[in-house]
Image: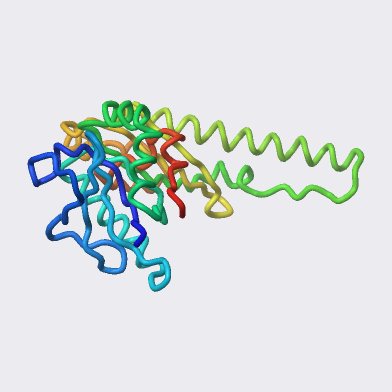
């Protein structure tokens, strides 16, 4: 029997209150395909898992939501390091090996993220001044003067979009004052772009952070602003952790 893994957490924060040496069921939590969710202890850590049969089980869009629900429920009471969706360990030894191999990274990450949460901001910018900058420049198939001219025009518009996005992200940072942030920007309409911003904040600041929404909405002109959270710290995991995928 394989094990589907949701996240890693500190063993001492789990409801059993003691350091169990064998996996135990977490009451009231259902995982992928409705399977009972268990805590698999490994030293000071516990990997939150459920049994998974590769021959009869499959992962689909519903499984994505089930995975996220287990991570969110674990996050309510503890610091969690989420595994990527579809992480499956074929044996118990594979779980233990993953924890042993990444123990230093896990320790550093848990210490850095303890007592913190992720908030997300989606900022859709529809600014008339961006209309020209958002138009895509199609490069000609031929080389020569026309190609170089279009290439320069494309680079100029890319810089204009990046400058606008950078200015907005600085403004958002000043308004919400997070500990850390991660930002992506993409075109969403012919005259608009989407800034997807993840902020890492202290749990004690969640209410204060949420209360800044009205101020931000008034100051960010020609923008649609949506704030969600708190979430587990999906965007603030070390790269090494993201590669832990068992035998999936």
Q: How is the image coloured?
A: rainbow
Query: At x 40% / y 40%, what residue is drawn?
Result: 197
Hey, which quadrant is residue 151 in on the image? top right
Figure disc tally: 0
Q: Position of residue 114 (x, y in %)?
A: 23, 31
Q: Residue furthest left?
A: 17
For residue 26, side relative to residue 147 (left or right): left
In depth, the one of 60 and 230 nearer the eye is 60
Residue 12 falls left or right of residue 137? left
From the top left corner, tell me how far across and down residue 111 is, in percent.
26, 27
Snapshot quadrant of residue 198:
top left
Residue drawn at x 47%, y 41% as measured from the top left: 243
Residue 217 visible in rendering: no
Residue 222: percent from left, percent from top: 42, 44
User: In x, y percent, where is residue 155?
Assistant: 70, 35
* Foreground residue among 161 and 41: 41
Look at 58% across and 54% down and name the residue there: 190
Look at the image and tell me in which quarter the N terminus lies.
bottom left
Looking at the image, can residue 104 be seen? yes
| In-front residue for pair 227/67 | 67
Q: Relative to residue 175, is residue 246 drawn left or right?
A: right
């Amino acid at each position: 029997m394989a094990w589907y893994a949701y996240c890693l957490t500190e063993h001492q924060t789990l409801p059993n209150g003691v350091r169990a040496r064998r996996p135990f069921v977490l009451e009231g939590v259902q995982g992928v395909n409705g399977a009972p969710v268990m805590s698999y202890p490994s030293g000071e850590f516990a990997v939150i898992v459920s049994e998974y049969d590769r021959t009869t089980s499959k992962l689909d869009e519903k499984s994505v939501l089930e995975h996220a629900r287990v991570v969110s429920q674990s996050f309510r009471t503890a610091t969690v390091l989420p595994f990527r969706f579809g992480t499956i360990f074929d044996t118990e030894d594979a779980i233990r090996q993953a924890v042993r191999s990444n123990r230093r990274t896990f320790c550093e990450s848990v210490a850095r993220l303890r007592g913190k949460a992720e908030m997300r901001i989606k900022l859709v910018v529809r600014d008339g001044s961006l209309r020209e900058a958002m138009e895509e420049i199609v490069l000609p198939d031929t080389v020569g003067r026309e190609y170089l001219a279009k290439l320069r025009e494309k680079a100029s518009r890319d810089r204009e979009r990046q400058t606008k996005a950078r200015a907005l992200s600085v403004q958002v940072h000043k308004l919400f004052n997070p500990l850390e942030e991660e930002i992506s920007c993409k075109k969403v309409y012919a005259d608009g772009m989407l800034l997807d911003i993840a902020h890492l904040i202290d749990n004690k600041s969640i209410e204060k952070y949420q209360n800044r929404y009205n101020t931000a909405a008034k100051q960010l002109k020609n923008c649609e602003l949506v704030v969600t959270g708190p979430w587990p710290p999906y965007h603030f995991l070390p790269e090494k952790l993201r590669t832990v995928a068992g035998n999936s």
